[in-house]
Image (cartoon, coloured by chain):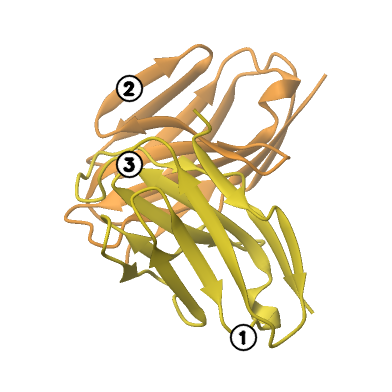
């Protein structure tokens, strides 16, 4: 089992460019999440998908869109990148978001720089 | 608003020392998580607890629900324990998922 995989690992964009971060999990989890991690701040939730076919905004959704392509895959799209979106992005999954006691498994992260 | 505070922010210790990292939160919770982030960046779940105490090898996590406080202890610390340790909580009825602390950066010197 690969767990949670993310591509790419690194990306440099110019302001205004678009890109999609890919995430896949092979643990048959229902719920998936996108976080961003910035220096001096805790992980912050961008969007989550409680189950296939649903997506919801988290704490910092502005400037992002997501797609839950199927049960395995959850992508994050930046339509017009801005320097404020320079961050490390983590995808995570869990058995079921609605269960309060559920462990999250994280991908390796994508380090994105927007110039 | 749910807030999660960790202390200390940075900790440097000698190999073999007993380490304690603290986490305080402001609302009632259903679960508290301790995570480890290594210098390479990957994040691994260490513990998930809602009461009492859990132990894995040299790591011990405790929680006091009434005081809204948790501690992570490392016994016989080793340089490979050097990492960022992150506390996260899920609020009761938590529709917004986990709230994360900023992390404690631990360095264990040989």
Judged from the image, the secondary structure of the residue bearing numbered disc 1 is: loop
Which residue is identified by label 3?
A29
Which residue is outermost to the right?
Answer: B110
Q: Residue at horizontal 32%, vertical 22%? A: B53
The reply to whether label 3 and label 1 mark residues of one chain is: yes
**Marker disc for residue B53:** 2
Horizontal side of B23 relative to B42 (left or right) equals left
Q: Which of marks 1 and 2 is in front?
A: 1
Residue B33, how many percent across, how many down?
A: 39, 39
How many C-alpha atoms fall within 10 Å of the one at disc 2: few (<14), some, or many (≥20)?
Answer: some
Q: Which chain carries label 2?
A: B
Q: Distance between the residues labelled 3 and 1?
A: 30 Å
Q: Residue at horizontal 60%, vertical 19%? A: B18
Q: Residue at horizontal 58%, vertical 50%? A: A6
Residue B59 visible at all: yes
Residue A107, how many percent across, how many down?
A: 55, 44
Which residue is identified by label 1?
A80
Residue B77, how many percent across, how many down?
A: 66, 18
Q: Which of A94 and B10 is in front in this view?
A: A94
In the picture, one chain is yellow; tell me its letter: A
Tell me, yes or no, whether the two marked residues, 3 and 1, touch with CB atoms within 8 Å: no
Q: Mark 3 lies on which chain?
A: A
Judged from the image, the secondary structure of the residue bearing numbered disc 3 is: loop
How many C-alpha atoms fall within 10 Å of the one at disc 1: few (<14), some, or many (≥20)?
Answer: some
């Amino acid at each position: 089992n690969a767990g949670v995989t993310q591509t790419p690992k690194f990306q440099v964009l110019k302001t205004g460019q678009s890109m999609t971060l890919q995430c896949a999990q092979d643990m048959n989890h229902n719920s998936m999440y996108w976080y961003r991690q910035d220096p001096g701040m805790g992980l912050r939730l961008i969007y989550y998908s409680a189950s296939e076919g649903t997506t919801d905004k988290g704490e910092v959704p502005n400037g992002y869109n997501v797609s839950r392509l199927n049960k395995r895959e959850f992508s994050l799209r930046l339509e017009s990148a801005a320097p404020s979106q320079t961050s490390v992005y983590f995808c995570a999954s869990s058995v079921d978001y609605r269960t309060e006691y559920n462990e999250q498994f994280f991908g390796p992260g994508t380090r994105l720089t927007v110039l | 608003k749910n807030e999660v505070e960790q202390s200390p922010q940075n900790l440097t210790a000698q190999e073999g020392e007993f380490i304690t990292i603290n986490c305080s939160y402001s609302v009632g919770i259903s679960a508290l998580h301790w995570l480890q982030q290594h210098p390479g960046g990957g994040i691994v779940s260490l513990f998930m607890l809602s009461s009492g105490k859990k132990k894995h090898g040299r790591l011990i996590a405790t929680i006091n629900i009434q005081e809204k406080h948790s501690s992570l202890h490392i016994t016989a610390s080793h340089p490979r324990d050097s990492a960022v340790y992150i506390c996260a909580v899920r609020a009761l009825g938590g529709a917004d998922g986990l709230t994360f602390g900023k992390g404690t950066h631990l360095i264990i010197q040989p």
